[in-house]
Structures are given as structure tokens and as C-alpha cells.
Amino acid sequence: MGENTVIAAGEQRSLRVSGMHVSVHGRERRFFTSLILPALVIMAFTIGFPLASGVRLGFFRYFLTDITGENRFIGLGNFANLLRDRAFYVSFYRTVEYAAGVVVLSFIIGFALALLLNQDIHMRGVFRSLFLVPWIVPYVVVSLLFMWILNANYGVFNVILSNIGLIKHFRGWLIEPRLAMPSVILATAWKTYPFFMLMLLAGLQTVPAEQYEAATIDGAGVIQRFLYVTWPNLREIIMIVTLLEFIWEFQNFTLIWVLTKGGPIDATNIWPVHIYKTAFKEFNMGYGSAMGVLWLVFLLIFSLGYIRVVGGKEAE
């Protein structure tokens, strides 16, 4: 064997260079480590450190405005207070209401458009592109757009409903407590329906045409083909995308903050908005951090459920 020789022994390989043995696996590990290490360091400073500081603050009585130095460790005091805080439970209910409403409305719109675009219609490619536009519009722009659409004095939504006779007087969609939550759900659904449309359309195109042909030969109508062919083939995709969207909407802050700031009368005061108000409006950082910790635990549970669903699907 020459001086420069590659020796294979099972899966372990070594490279002999000028009398020295260098493990190829060792070199690969060092190479990959050198690539990943900068990202790990950045994540530690930008995610790990703030997260650890937030968790630590949750165990302190800590007011930003307190100059007396009485901020102190109180253990589980903040968490115990949370269990007795009615506003906390109301904000949690508002969050579930908001996330569920967005998921249901986005799913209905996205599924209907996916079924439409799965047909051989004229200019299908153009419509696909147009229907995806809301997805690329930033949340702040969507918020400003719907502030204009839903304005109580000159909003185009009031004008349309008034002209077709559904309302007699202009309504304050964002300033009336009963209408505020449906309004922010509508605005968010307009932003998020393309995600459902895209995923479900991809799923529809994987359904074998032979199944539809067999169902048609057996005399199945449109509804029967949907119930016994389309739905079973898309069931797993639907489960994954709805669960994923539900988790995302639990984190949504920008749209509601710009549209209503959690009002009127806390009608849209979802969990992220409530945490922000507590920490940065009332300057109660300890209590706000405790809420953030519970919010994180709740999202972790949902994320683990999501990973389990996806993992189970990939294992099949």
C-alpha cells in the first residue's frame, strides 16, 4: 500500500497521509461542528438567554417602576396568583375562541378554493397566483387594510352590506364588543386561508383518479365521491394543517394589536396581548413572565402533539 492510502474497516475509514492516520469520521464531525457552532452560539444569545431570563423573572416580584429595590424572589407566587386571576382565564378563553375561529374559517375558504382549483378551469394558473397574494402580505399591512375595510364611518364592508340590504345602519365592526372578535377572525382568515388552499390542493392532486372512476361506475354522486374518496385521502393532511395553524394562531399578536389593541372592553384580549399589556403597560414584568412561561408550556404540549402526529404519519 502506498503512503497515501484509504483503509475501509466496516464503516470506519481512515486516511494515511505521510505516516499519520486521520479518521474520516472525526474530520467530518469536526467539519459539521464548525458549520453548526456559529448558529448555536447565535441561537443561545438570541433565544436561549432571553428565554432563560423570562423563566427566571417568573419567580420574582419584579416591577420596572419599582425604584425601592423591593423586587425579590417569591418562588411560585406569581403562578399561584395566576390561578386566581379571572382576567387570565378570560384571555385564555379569548385565545381559544380566536384560534378556533380562524382555523375553521380559513379551512372552509381554503378547502373550497382547493376543490375549485383542482378542476380543469380556464386560467387556473392565474387564479392560483391571485389566491396566494394574501399569504405574502405582511400582518401589519393586512391590519391597516382591514382597518379601512371595517371602518365604522366609511368602511367598504358597511357600504356593501348596506347596499344589499343586510344592515340598515353602519356598524362599528372593530369598536362594538360583540363584533370585534368576528372581525379580527375574518381579517386573520383572509391572511391565512392560502396556507390551507395550497396544502389541500397538493393533497387533492395525489388522490388516484382510478378511485374516482371506480366510485362513478358504482353510481356514486358528487357528495358520495367527496365523502368516500376525497375526505379519507385528505384526512391526515387536514389533521396536520389544522393543528399547525391552531398553534400559529396562539402566537399571533401583530394583527390584533394593530386592529383593536385587545379591546373593546377586552373583547379581543388574547393571551399574547394580555401578556404584553401586563409586562410593558403595567410594568409588572414578573407576573407577565409567569404568564409567558405557562403560554410556553401550553404551546410545547401542542407542539409535541403535532410532532407525534407527523412522526406517526412518516413512520407509516
Image: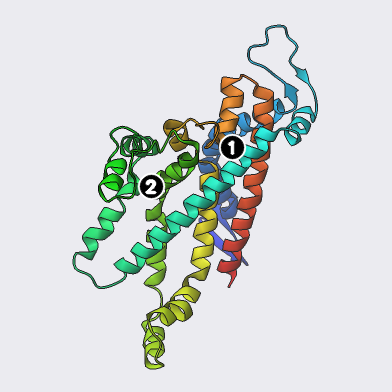
Q: Mark 2: few, some, or many residues within 10 Å (few <14, many ≥20)? A: many
The CA distance from mark 1 to mark 2 is 20 Å
Place residue 194 in its image quadrant.
Answer: bottom left
Which residue is label 2 attached to? 191
- Sort mark 1 into few (<14), some (14-19) or many (20+) by Cα contacts within 10 Å: many
Residue type highlighted by circle 1: Trp
Give the quarter of the figure containing the C terminus.
bottom right
Q: Which residue has dot 1 on it?
A: 271
Give the image location of residue 32, x and y in percent: 53, 47
> What kind of element bears circle 2?
helix
Apparent side of residue 11 relative to residue 157 in the rendered image (left or right): right
At x 56% / y 47%, what residue is drawn?
97
Q: Position of residue 79 (x, y in %)?
A: 75, 33
Residue drawn at (45%, 32%) of the image: 260
Quarter of the image where the N terminus is located: bottom right
Q: Residue at x 49, y 54 (%)?
A: 103
Q: Residue furthest top?
A: 68
Q: Amino acid at mark 2?
A: Lys
Residue furthest toward the front? 168
Q: Furthest residue to the left?
A: 122
Q: Please tell me which of labels 1 and 2 falls first in the chain.
A: 2
Instruction: Judge whether 250 appears above or below 291 on screen.
Output: below
